[in-house]
Amino acid sequence: MSAEITKAGGALAIRPDQTEWTPDQAAVLQQSGISNAVTKAELSGFLHLCQRTGLDPFSRQIYLIGRWNKKEQRDVFTPQTGIDGYRVIAQRVTSQTGGTYGYEDTLWCDLSGKWRDVWLLDAPPAAAKVTVIRNGQRFSAVARFSEYVQTFPDGNPKGLWAKMPAGQVAKCAEALALRKAFPHDLAGVYTAEEMAQADNPAAGERHLRKVQPGEGDPWAAPQTAAQGRDYLHEAREAADADAVRRIWREAQADGAVPECLEQIAAVGREWATAARTDLPDDDGVVDGEFVEPTTTDPVTDAQAAEAELRAAAARVGLTTLDADFEQSYGLPISEAGASQLREMAAILGASAA
């Protein structure tokens, strides 16, 4: 795939065998907005990602975006593309490897927890769900509007998030689903719609963090193949300990290896320690949950998640929970994993807030 980049020719063509940017390439990258604050590791990772995905930074197919990080006291640079870049990669990989890929109808969830195949309301949806079908296998993902919306300091949505909220959150769900279906090819590069919330006031400084010595490369392939997600990378980019806790639960339910769970747990403990003054005195959940992450029984965890989901449904007055869940996830509640149960409980919780 990377060989296709060289077809354009010229001094800016990326060779599959090059290990660093040429002076001409570096000059153009700098003109595109990549400042001297970028690290050598970030530039090297970006080159590798361009070679692996086949996206050309000089044709504006992929960018290296810098965002101020208060903890690092510098701009932290993250690869970013549009949803069209994801679709290009998916189509290219399918053509090169054979097989098929397509989509089921996009679904949107309202504040009552009901899923719709078209969004006609003026208010933004609570979430969107996209299912990618690759070689006959379904890869579904749900994106909550509140987790991705880009806002002004007063909390109101900005730009396309205000004008076309249903389309924006659907793009985020599609990106999540495509990363599940094409884990190796899309690992480490995020869409503009997904990353927009990193620019929210008081959020950007906690959303991105520099990779520390000894940690894995966040642009490398996912550590768990069960769902095609890089759980450790997600944990490192999480906004707080609660988000890391949720990621840890999903990783465990999806069969992540113990080493990955422990690394996620370490990130959770770091956030819990940093935010200790913000937690209630009787919380204690974060530390306890992350001390022995591999000892939780998946069956017991699923039972607890089901209880949480039914309680959430009762709070919003949803009487068709079982039917709605099976329609959304394609299986009954009794057969669902903890991550799916908590995913819907979170959506219902958002509607009750």
Image (spheres, rainbow, N blue to C red):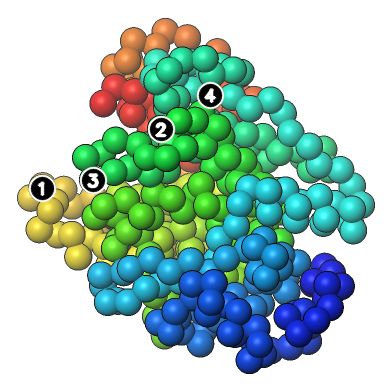
Tell whether 279 sits left or right of 292. left
Instruction: Determine which of the numbered discs, if any, sits on residue 280 in the image.
Output: 1
Please rate how many residues cluster around mark 4, counting C-alpha atoms within 10 Å: few if below 14, some from 14 to 19, many from 20: many
Q: Are marks 2 and 4 in contact (CB under 8 Å)?
A: no
Label 3 or label 1, whichever comes before in sequence order: 3
- The Cα atoms of the two marked residues, 4 and 1, are separated by 34 Å
Mark pair 3, 1: CA separation: 26 Å
Q: Which residue is mark 2?
A: 162
Three-letter amino acid code at the position of disc 4 = Trp
Which residue position is annotated with label 3?
Answer: 153
Q: Secondary structure at mark 2?
A: helix
Question: Which marked residue is nearer to the observer: mark 2 or mark 1?
Answer: 2
Dot 3: what SS? loop
Place residue 8 in its image quadrant: bottom right
Labels 4, 1: front one: 4
Residue 123 in the image: x percent, y percent? 40, 20
Query: Circle 4 sits on which residue?
Result: 108
Relative to 77, say whether 119 is above or below. Answer: above
- The Cα–Cα distance between marks 2 and 3, rounded to whole angstroms, is 14 Å
Q: Residue at x 32, y 15 (%)?
A: 316
